[in-house]
Image (cartoon, helix red, strand yellow):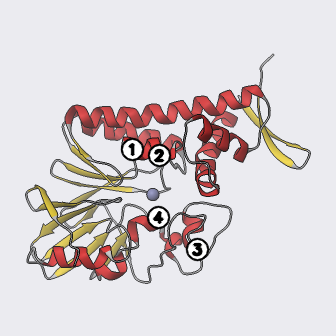
């Protein structure tokens, strides 16, 4: 029977490896489990491991509502579930992951959305504190993502990614990359002050390692922005063409799902370029294309 080993990383704070990894804090009779993760069966293993800590209640806390972070909730059988206000639409029956990832459509399987759609029937909204945790705003990857701070440990969700994930996907998913950069700058301050950052998809980092990882995430976004503008400078292009060409240039996977996810980040960058007056959309033949706006 497989099991999950909880690694103690601070007083009453434990780390469960995974992608996403989970963070557990014990306060009195309750264990607070941040991002139970996936697959569904991970919930059973987490429940077993957490109950061994001598608690009688489990509370699930979610940074955001992408399926990979919450599929294990069902078998974790928490007494309470707290989610970021503003993201509840994503887990309503019939809305599902497609909309959670802000696609223009929703689908009933994980083929295009990466993860099985998850539905939560009963939840409460996070406020500024959740048990022993202080709740930190980290929007950008999703509209209202939250981080969870306890002592010098900060669980950052998908606000930054480990280098392996960045290398694999090429273009990290950002609903709004500008908000994402603001969140990263906030994390840079925490990193510089010596806080331990716990990533969902990546390592636990501190000090120089934490600073350089956040800086790497910032420069990844800046580099992708540069690549989007370079593609537009060559000729007018539609969003999927820009996304695909950049994925190829970065040596990342180029299947339909990768392009759909990368398109979201590209759209966010195009919106910024449009606001800055350096890119504009137009209809060309049967496509909506974007072009670089030259100032004469
Ligand atoms: Zn996510």
Report the mark closest to the observer, 1 or 4: 1
Which x, y percent locates residue 100? 54, 65
Report the mark closest to the observer, 3 or 4: 3
In the rendered view of the protein, which quadrant contains the N terminus?
bottom left
Residue projecting furthest to the top: 296
Distance, label 1 to label 4, CA atoms, is 20 Å
Which x, y percent locates residue 42? 31, 73
- The 10 Å Cα crowd at callout 3, few under 14, some 14 to 19, many 20 or more, is some
Q: Nearer the viewer, residue 274 or 198?
A: 198
Mark found first going from the N terminus, 1 or 3: 3
Q: Does the residue labelled 4 lie within 8 Å of ligand 1?
A: yes
Q: Is mark 1 within 8 Å of ligand 1?
A: no
- The 10 Å Cα crowd at callout 1, few under 14, some 14 to 19, many 20 or more, is few
Q: Would you name the residue on which mark 1 appears?
A: 164
Q: Would you name the residue on which mark 4 appears?
A: 66
Report the mark closest to the observer, 3 or 2: 2
Q: Secondary structure beneath disc 4?
A: loop
Mark seen at residue 292: none
Q: Would you name the residue on which mark 3 appears?
A: 109
Dot 1 and dot 2 residues touching (CB under 8 Å):
yes
Q: Quadrant of residue 219?
A: top left
Q: Would you name the residue on which mark 2 appears?
A: 168
User: What residue lies at 37% left-to-right and 69% top-to-bottom?
Assistant: 38
Q: Secondary structure beneath disc 3?
A: loop
In the depicted structure, whether residue 136 falls above or below residue 95: above
Mark found first going from the N terminus, 3 or 4: 4
């Amino acid at each position: 029977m497989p099991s999950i080993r909880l690694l103690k990383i601070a007083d009453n704070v434990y780390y469960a490896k995974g992608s996403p990894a989970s963070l557990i804090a014990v306060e009195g009779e309750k264990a607070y489990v941040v991002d139970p993760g996936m697959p569904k069966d991970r919930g059973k293993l987490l429940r077993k491991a957490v109950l061994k800590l001598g608690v009688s209640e489990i509370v699930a806390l979610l940074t955001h509502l992408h399926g990979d972070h919450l599929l294990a909730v069902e078998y974790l059988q928490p007494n309470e579930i707290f989610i970021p206000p503003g993201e509840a639409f994503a887990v309503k029956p019939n809305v599902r992951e497609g909309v959670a990832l802000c696609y223009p459509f929703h689908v009933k399987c994980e083929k295009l959305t990466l993860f099985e759609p998850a539905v939560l029937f009963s939840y409460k909204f996070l406020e500024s504190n959740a048990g022993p945790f202080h709740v930190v705003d980290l929007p950008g990857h999703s509209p209202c993502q939250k981080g969870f701070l306890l002592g010098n440990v900060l669980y950052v969700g998908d606000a930054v990614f480990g280098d392996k994930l960045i290398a694999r996907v090429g273009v990290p998913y950002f609903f709004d990359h500008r908000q994402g950069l603001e969140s990263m700058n906030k994390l840079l301050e925490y990193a510089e002050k010596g806080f331990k950052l716990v990533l969902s998809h990546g390592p636990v980092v501190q000090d120089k390692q934490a600073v350089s990882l956040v800086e790497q995430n910032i420069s990844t976004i800046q580099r992708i922005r540069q690549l989007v503008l370079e593609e537009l400078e060559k000729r007018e292009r539609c969003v999927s063409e820009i996304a695909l060409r950049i994925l190829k240039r970065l040596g990342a996977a180029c299947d339909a799902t990768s392009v759909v996810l990368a398109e979201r980040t590209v759209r966010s960058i195009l919106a910024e370029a449009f606001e800055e007056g350096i890119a504009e959309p137009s209809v060309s033949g049967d496509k909506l294309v974007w072009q670089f706006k030259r100032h004469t």
